[in-house]
Image (cartoon, coloured by chain):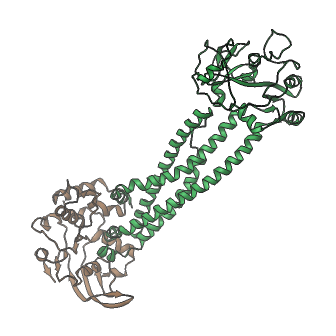
Amino acid sequence: MNPWPVVLADLRALRWVAWIAPLLVAIAVSVGVALSAQERGLRQATAQAASDFDLLIGAPGSQTQLVLTTVYLQPEALPLVDGAILAALANDPRVKAAAPIAFGDVSRGYPIVGTTAAFVTRWDRIKPSEGRIFAREGEAVVGADVRLAVGDAITPSHAHAGQRHPFGIESPEEARHRHEGVRYAVVGRLPRFGSPWDRAILVPVESVWETHGLGNGHAAEEGPIGPPFDGAQAPGVPAIVVKPNTVADAYALRGQYRQGGTMAFFPAEVLVSVYRTLGDVRDLLLVAAVLNDVVVFAAAAILLLALAGLRRRRYAVLRALGASRLYVVLTAWLGAVAILAAGCAAGLALAQLTSLAVIQLIEARTGLALPAAIALPDALPIVGLLALGSLLALMPALAAFRIPVADALRHG
Amino acid sequence: MRSSDVYEGAAAPSRLSVEGLGVDRIEAGRVACAILSDIQFVLEPGATAAVTGPSGAGKTTLLYAVAGLVRPDRGGVRWGGSDIAAWPERRRDRWRRDAVGLVFQDFQLFPELGVVDNILLPTRFDRVRSPAALRERARALAERVGVAAVTPRRRALAWRAAAGRGGARPHPPACPAPCRRADRKPRSGEWSTGRRYFVGDGKRDTRDLADRVA
């Protein structure tokens, strides 16, 4: 038994409807899939970007803002935490490493972040893809997406909180606030993190302090850069990233620095809360998307049911020529399933295209590299939807099953 | 080539006998009138017959009853002595596929399929692919009736294609259509050498083809 020749003939007979019906299904399906893929991708990308920030210490305020500014480099004025804590952390046996993160300057739209060489290599996890890490004040390492070459020289400008600068060009606003006399030489480039740090220019924190007339954080005027910092000399910093030795140490440090004029937290805590909200919104939108899908599938099934009515005579001819009821049922059912399946497949492709476009958009706006679009968990609900659609497609098939042949031959 | 070879496993030619056949018109669940009553005839293999009558006389109902598409209210249709109404539906389907060729008044071809695929369509009812030999024979049959290279859209050619589909059986075709334009269609002997008998609803040209006119 091979109903496909008739199924294909039926589809050809539909002409443009055979294209429009799957297209409508595809659009409906793609919304839910793209939504699920984006939300998952955003989670993965944001979690990945935060993975090197074990414990954050900052001045009391908004934890979310501290994460946004430190991990995702969204510029905002943050209260400063006492620089003496840097020295205390350096001597704390529970701390494997600690690095100050200082913001405030910008060059050609790229934020300049002052930190230590150890944090630039993410605690020795990565190596520069080109050149080397800074070794003295006045040297800079650029992120993978910064359009500066090793050997270039830049002059930082003072950035204003909340202000966005176009990447790669010096805006007039930036030119007006240039720190004349301060220059950084680019000595290296980092591999891609897939995070906003790919668009940052990393310099020794001492240079940032000195640029703003705050000294260099060390007792001596001249000397090696990096920790240990002098407790009395180190200026305040917006954030300190701490890598604890053990999980127990992490919780102990978090407890200790939650009092006495500082706050300490794991970025994951903030992310989990953000994810919860994001998840709630996603669930709401997914419910709407699924309802949308069901409505479109039901509409498609009704359309196919109406078609089966119009094809009564065609099916009756098949029966008159000797086709069994099963053959006619299969013909009607496979035709409907083919339209729905084509719609689902096109929907997945459409969702992939949409996701790729949104990924580009998100990356352009935030620097977060979302993982490649659709994954199996996003597509699985479509299998369920297709199963439901196949059940709905039984309606036109059963209508074809019940056709009284002689009557349909005569009256259509 | 014999067109009867197109379908393998076709039912053997048998005597067709219609005995006391009666079919009622049912309206609102009640018998409104008799469409056919006490129809009797016997057709031996190879015989040709035409049925004539005015519109509404029951010619089509008779043909559908003979083809097993309408269940008789009285009497029956026997194929080689066996009452087709007593057969399971699947057997009747298979018998229609193998032994009956229907050519419809308005042809009822699938215009999206080519002529050859229209002719071969019933072979797909019980097999996945039409064997190459069958396809070749169907093509030869289409060429024989002069429609091999056309899509079955033009009316005159559609008749030939429909006749080809109906004629691709060993005992075809039962034809409920007024067979117009007989002068333009191939003579029956040319396109259906396997013809055993012909039941039509005879206008002049249909009658010309028949051995018997009723």
Q: Position of residue A41 (x, y in %)?
A: 62, 41
Figure quadrant of residue A258: top right
Q: B3 or A30: which is nearer to us?
A: A30
Q: Position of residue B85 (x, y in %)?
A: 35, 81
Up-down relation of residue A386 to residue A376 (above or below):
below
Q: Position of residue B96 (x, y in %)?
A: 31, 72
- Name the residue rendered at 24%, 73% in the picture: B13
Most extreme residue toward the front, as rendered? A176
Chain B drawing hue: brown
Figure quadrant of the N terminus of chain B: bottom left
- Name the residue rendered at 29%, 61% in the picture: B110
- Name the residue rendered at 82%, 32% in the picture: A59
Chain identifier matching the green colour in the rendered picture = A
Up-down relation of residue B165 to residue B23 (above or below):
above
Q: B206 or B158: which is nearer to us?
A: B158
Q: Position of residue A215 (x, y in %)?
A: 80, 15
